Amino acid sequence: MVRAARLLALVIVVFSVACSEPPNKEMNLAQGAIETARAAGAERFAAEELTAAIGALKRSNEAAADNDYRQALSHALDSFERAQNAAKLAGEGRANARGEAERAVAQVATLLTTAEGRVKSSPLPARTLQAPQQALRSAHISLQKAGAALAKEDYLAVEPALEGVAAEIEAALRQLDAPPAAAPNRRKR
């Protein structure tokens, strides 16, 4: 019983001493965690959690300015936890975006290669092949833009660069499969 009372007294003393000055260490840790989250890409991949961490740190600073060190500590710890979570979410989001971007580029590249092979081996007249060839050139340019974005690790730019490209290639393939239009009958006079 005496030992429990001493332990309780020690906890009260430590807690009251800890709350008698601003929690600068915890606030600095929270700020560092926010910067780490930003570096991990949280602004793009975990914006909501990063914003919550920044807000909690702001509230911590305001509480410290009001000499409410207990509340400042609570907000600083919340900020730190949210910033760490934002960094984790950013890493996961970045990995997912990379995987999706790589799959999209590979899918369009495969479709484009197939279509280019079909154009080369097509028995259709050159005039009939002009529209599909133009569509494939346009698709190739879009694929290059998407590849450049992928190389820069700008995974969120890949999807817009490839938007509609697969449909254009498929339309070009349908043009290759379409039967040639019959020549109009000309009357002799």
Image (cartoon, rainbow, N blue to C red):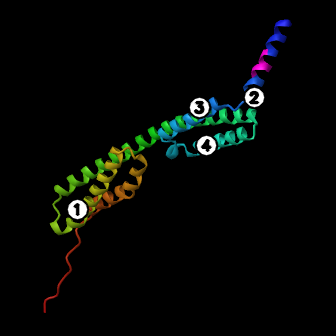
- Residue 103 screen position, x and y as percent: 37, 43
Disc 1: CA contacts within 10 A as few (<14), some (14-19) or many (>=20): some
Instruction: Tell me where the magenta segment starts and ends, as one range.
Output: 10-14
* Image coordinates for residue 94, horizontal then vertical, percent: 46, 40
Mark 4 vs mark 1, CA separation in Å: 52 Å
**Does dot 1 land on a helix, a strand or a loop?**
helix
Give the mark, 3 or 2, whose residue is nearer the N terminus. 2
Residue 2 higher or lower than 185, as above or below: above
- What is the C-alpha distance between the residues marked 1 and 3? 58 Å
Task: In the rendered view, tell whether residue 189 sits above or below residue 170.
Answer: below
Question: Can you identify the residue that label 3 sits on?
Answer: 29
**Could one spot residue 70 in this view of the protein?**
yes
What label sits on residue 20 in the rendered view?
2
Give the camera-side residue of 172 and 88.
88
Amino acid on which disc 3 is placed: Leu
- How far is mark 3 from mark 2, CA to CA? 19 Å
